[in-house]
Image (cartoon, helix red, strand yellow):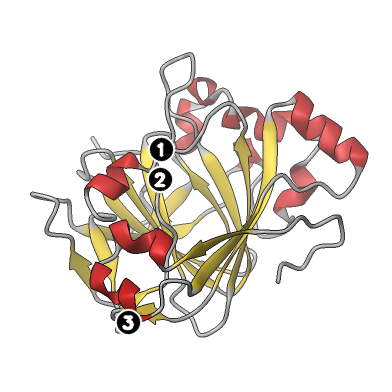
């Protein structure tokens, strides 16, 4: 399911039953609990040399394939997670590439005082900045194929999304963003678009995998405290203002 010319392990499969805690209508699980929604391929490398480099730099290259469709009128999505803080007290970032299909990245701060929906299409690279949790939604009619690079120094934190039954908003089949009643007063959703980040070597010209072996391009994934200004330019909204970090 993932276009890949290297060794491909069996995927981890997230089923409808696995997603019950974060759905707008959890009762929908009863219809087909074993239905697969997305597939996660972890720790990929095309060559032994690439794998050794990734391991030496505490990084991992992954892929995710999200099927199209709906669950109880809600678009198929990932479960959603936050990243913990590193030794410097800054939350780890992550970077994604849309390999195929359409993607909506729904980002939010811990308190949901900033919520951003990023539209992505094939070739787009999106940096998830420190302090933001994220859910990825498939709004299209074909499978959504993603690649990502992330630090191996942590495990993702799903608790916030589980306890609040998902993100601050649910994206419905008609594109409506319905507020999640478990949040008292989430910020209105602001829409953003991916933008090239020269400090992180991200643009539409090169695929994410070409950054494997380039320490300066990926150093921010483990040491985000060194790159505070760089994160401010990873997304832009319609007004061409930074949409990556919380606004003052």
The residue labelled by disc 3 is: 173
Q: Which residue is pictured at 53% across the width and 75% down the height?
A: 67
Q: Is residue 105 left or right of residue 247?
A: right
Judge whether 186 appears above or below 38 on screen.
above
| Picture quadrant where residue 70 is located | bottom left
Residue 235 x, y percent position in the rendering: 45, 51
Q: CA distance from mark 2 to mark 3?
A: 22 Å
Q: Quadrant of the N terminus?
A: bottom right
Q: Secondary structure at mark 1?
A: loop
Q: Which residue is pictured at 22% across the width and 49% down the height?
A: 164
Q: Nearer the viewer, residue 214 or 141?
A: 141
Crowding at dot 3, Cα within 10 Å, few <14 / some 14-19 / many 20+, comes out as some
Crowding at dot 2, Cα within 10 Å, few <14 / some 14-19 / many 20+, comes out as many
Crowding at dot 1, Cα within 10 Å, few <14 / some 14-19 / many 20+, comes out as some
Residue 192 seen: no
Q: Secondary structure at mark 2?
A: loop
Q: Is residue 9 left or right of residue 201?
A: right
Q: CA distance from mark 1 to mark 2?
A: 5 Å
Judge whether 217 appears above or below 118 on screen.
above
The residue labelled by disc 2 is: 81
The residue labelled by disc 1 is: 157
- Tag on residue 41? none
Q: Mark 1–mark 2 contact, CB under 8 Å? A: yes
Q: CA distance from mark 3 to mark 1?
A: 27 Å
| Picture quadrant where residue 188 is located | bottom left
Query: Outermost residue toward the top?
Result: 88
Query: Outermost residue toward the right?
Result: 48
């Amino acid at each position: 399911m993932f276009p890949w010319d290297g060794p491909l392990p069996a995927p981890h499969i997230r089923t409808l039953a696995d997603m019950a805690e974060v759905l707008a209508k959890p009762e929908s699980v009863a219809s087909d609990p074993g239905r697969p929604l997305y597939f996660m391929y972890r720790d990929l490398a095309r060559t032994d040399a690439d794998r050794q480099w990734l391991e030496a730099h505490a990084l991992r290259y992954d892929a995710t394939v999200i099927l199209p469709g709906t669950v109880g009128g809600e678009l198929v999505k990932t479960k959603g997670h936050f990243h913990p803080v590193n030794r410097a007290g800054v939350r780890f970032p992550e970077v994604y590439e849309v390999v195929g299909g359409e993607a909506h990245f729904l980002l939010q701060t811990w308190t949901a005082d900033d919520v951003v929906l990023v539209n992505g299409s094939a070739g787009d690279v999106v940096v998830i900045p420190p302090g933001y949790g994220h859910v990825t939604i498939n709004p299209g009619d074909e499978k959504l194929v993603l690649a990502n690079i992330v630090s191996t120094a942590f495990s993702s934190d799903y608790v916030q999304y589980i306890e609040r039954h998902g993100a601050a908003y649910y994206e419905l089949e008609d594109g409506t963003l319905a507020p999640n009643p478990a949040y008292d007063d989430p910020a209105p959703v602001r829409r953003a678009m991916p933008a090239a980040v020269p400090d992180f070597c991200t643009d539409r010209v090169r695929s994410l995998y070409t950054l494997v072996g380039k320490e300066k391009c990926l150093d921010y994934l483990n040491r985000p405290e060194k790159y505070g200004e760089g994160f401010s330019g990873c997304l832009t909204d319609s007004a061409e203002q930074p949409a990556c970090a919380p606004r003052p």
